[in-house]
Image (cartoon, helix red, strand yellow):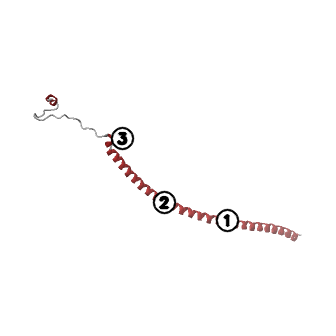
Amino acid sequence: QHQQGQGQGQQHQGQPQQQQYPPAPPPPDALNGPGGLSISEATFKSRAIRVLTEKLKTELDVIQSLSSGEVERLLALQAELVERRERIEAGLRAMRGERGQWESRIGSMNAATVALAEWLSENEEGKAS
């Protein structure tokens, strides 16, 4: 037995020699979490997911707030455009009505002009004779 210990260094005489074994591996369930990750890897992954989820929720809240403000602005603009359209269409109807009246007046004046021109040509002939 003394020769076995000589390869590993000198042992003190009088002490019983103890056999050296490598440390026992930990049980597989103790180190491995879900998916075969170690506990530290699983903890890191879990915390990273939680932090990233919180950041995404915060960014989503900001985007949602900005979007709702933009939606309100666009709805107000839409209401204003609807009002403008109604005013323009009312103005267009009024102008079409006025155009009809003017066309009627112009038609009447044209007829009166033709009648007057005929009267003048008849009466000028009468004076000449």
Q: Residues within 10 Å of mark 1 (few under 14, many from 20)?
A: few
Q: Is residue 22 found left or right of 93 in the rendered image?
A: left
Q: Which residue is label 3 attached to? A: 36
Give the Cα separation between the discs numbered 2 and 3: 44 Å
First along the sequence among labels 2 and 3: 3
* Label of residue 68 in the image: 2
> What residue is at 65 percent from the left and 64 percent from the top?
92
Q: Is residue 27 above or below residue 8?
A: below
| Disc nearest the viewer among 1 and 2 | 2
Q: Is residue 112 left or right of residue 11?
A: right
Q: Secondary structure at mark 1?
A: helix
Residue closest to the eye, 24 or 98 = 24
Q: Position of residue 37 (x, y in %)?
A: 35, 42
Q: Image quadrant for the C terminus?
A: bottom right
Q: Where in the figure is residue 81, as x and y percent of width and height?
A: 57, 62
Q: Residue at x 64, y 66 (%)?
A: 90
Residue drawn at x 36%, y 41% as measured from the top left: 36
Residue 118, image quadrant? bottom right
How far apart are the alpha carbons under marks 3 and 1?
77 Å
From this view, report whether residue 12 is shown above or below residue 114: above
Q: Is residue 88 left or right of residue 49?
A: right
User: Farthest top residue?
Assistant: 3
Mark 2 residue type: Ser
Residue farthest to the left, as pictured: 14
Q: Earlier in the sequence, mark 1 or mark 2?
A: 2
Label 3 sits on a secondary structure element that is helix
- Asked if residue 2 lies left or right of residue 49, the reply is left
In the rendered image, which residue does mark 1 sit on?
Answer: 93
Query: Mark 2 Cα within 10 Å, few/some/many (few <14, many 20+)?
Result: few
Image coordinates for residue 14, horizontal then vertical, percent: 10, 34
What amino acid type should be assigned to the residue bearing mark 3?
Answer: Gly
